[in-house]
Image: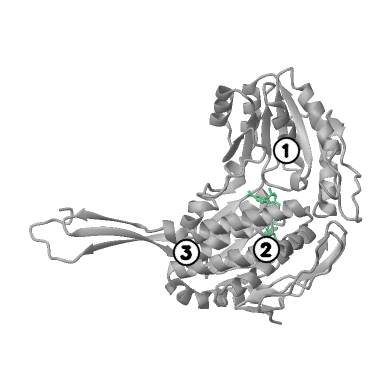
Amino acid sequence: MTHPTGPRFDATSYEFTRYIDVHNWIGGEWVPAAGGAKLEVVNPRHGATIGDVTMSDGGDIDRAVAAAKAAFPAWRATPMRERARVLHNLRRIMEDNIDELTWLLSHEMGKTFPEAKAEVEKGIECLEFGLSMPNMENGAAQDVSRGVSCAVNYEPLGVCAGITPFNFPIMVPMWMIPQVLVAGNTFVLKPSEKAPYGSMKLAHMLRAAGLPDGVFNVVNGARETVEGLLDNPDVKAIGFVGSTKVAKIVYARGAANGKRVLALGGAKNHLVLMDDAEFELATENIPASAFGAQGQRCMAASVLVAVGDNVQPFIDEMVNVAKQYDLGPKLGPVIDQAAVDRMTRYVTQAEEMGAKVLVDGRNAKGPGGGTWFGPTIMDHCTPEMPAGCEEIFGPVLSIIRVKTLDEAIRIENHNPYGNAAAIFTTNGHTARYAVDRFQAGMVGINIGVPVPREPFAFGGWNESKFGHGDITGYDGFRFWTRPRKVTTKWAKQVDQTWMG
Ligand code: NAD
């Protein structure tokens, strides 16, 4: 089964559309996985099967890694500017087909069309950073002694692998693909088994962009497939994005096998609301952060720490805003029934422990019969409640009320995650005080989703990231390369020591 530019996804609305079964993309061909076990890919808006994905076994992984290994010497020998040209072409193809890509990812993971389009656009922004590397990356050179020079080149590692989550099927692969490929590596991508089509589409598009066969490969599957990649000796580096539980496993097993690993994990993002905050800015941004993309963002607000005695009008208005989120057009479904059950459990448990549910998303029904959970706001939560300290990964905002900013900062600091934090205030000193003390890699001032835009790199701290550096931007390039230092002397030196 070959598709030079790939099968089209015909949806132009939320109406249910079936897609084709998922195959692996190995050496420029579609290959059915031999693994055997099949999982349905379900459109969460309709609860209907969009296609099937077969789990890849050891043989499938070996084939993909072998294809990537065989393609490496020629790709590495291709000048960086030529490698980047393929990404230029990919950018054009993605833009020309942006609606198709957008509908595809809306159907596979449930985002609304505007949110899905924003994801594709952010993916393109990441691509733009990667394709500009030849204009930025010129190593460094210096005469370190008389007649002796040192230079450094950043060399590719070889076969690299990426493992990605369900919630950003285009953007998260795009955190890795540009830097991996422009650096001269070859790649095996293992997308989420819940949303594998975005990666299939990217494979088609990369080939149409002129990427040689074998440079980019996709293997589908779940836990065993990831373990196979972690244990394969020809895989030199692993980029992982997903939950903290799995990030820890991937980091430990990959490192034990001598691989370079960067593993981004889950989050519990705290937004601190001061009562001097700008009213509209805060009451629009905070619900948008908590409920946008169904709260299924690692940057979503999860805890609102409301400081002082004058925050009630803000909370009342956020309740009004939350009630206006129509399920369907403004808020999509959550990924599956297990997610609905998990969110329900957290809210019910918090209620039993004394929280007051101001907006209740349990038992919400959207159009289309899929898996839905409505925006939820709970007041009078505590950091000890599971909903106050664990990742819920749904549209649930837990409010903790405190008297002082220091108390708010202590709560944020005490949480083991460290992806994002933000403060809403009109006071510069207050903002600076909080920013300097938050335990988070990505911090916002009056911004609910403080995602760094390119060229600033993406990555959290603490239990939200294992490994050194960030995954995007220049750090991404450094992660997927290794420095080779070259020291050169062309003339014989007389009366000189090696330090002369
Ligand atoms: P997940 O951890 O369940 O899955 C991520 C990937 O790991 C998938 O490809 C999956 O097949 C694989 N996997 C699952 N269990 C595994 C196991 N036991 N061993 C090896 N591999 C395994 O995450 P998800 O549910 O797809 O995505 C949601 C999670 O991802 C949330 O926790 C969210 O915060 C996190 N996330 C983090 C970031 C970030 O930048 N820090 C970005 C997006 C999502």
**Residue most extreme to the front:** 96
Residue on which disc 1 sits: 302
CB atoms at circles 3 and 1 under 8 Å apart? no
Mark 3: amino acid: Ala
* Residue 359 position within the rendered picture, expressed as x and y whole percent measured from the top left: 86, 35
Answer whether labels 2 and 3 touch (C-beta < 8 Å): no
- Left-right relation of 370 to 287: right
Q: Return the residue nearer the eye: 87 or 238.
A: 87
Disc 1 crowd rating (10 Å Cα; few below 14, some 14-19, many 20+) is: many
Going by the numbered disc 2, the residue's amino acid type is Pro
Q: Which mark is residue 191?
A: 2
Does label 2 point to a residue whose CB lies under 8 Å from ligand 1?
yes
Q: Inspect this view and state whether residue 260 appears.
A: no
Q: How is the image coloured?
A: one colour
From the viewer's side, name the closer residue of 125 and 21: 125
Query: Which secondary structure, mark 1?
Result: strand
Where ligand 1 lies, by image quadrant? bottom right
Q: Which disc, if any, is residue 183?
A: 3
Q: Residue furthest top?
A: 309
Q: Quadrant of residue 419?
A: top right
Q: Where is residue 475 shown, x and y percent of the image?
A: 49, 52
User: Residue 112 appears at what percent x and percent y?
Assistant: 78, 52
Which of the marked residues, 3 or 1, is nearer the chain's N terminus?
3
Q: How many marks?
A: 3
Determine whether the beta carbon of the residue marked 3 sits less than 8 angstroms from the nearest atom of ligand 1.
no
Q: Residue at x 78, y 45 (%)?
A: 394
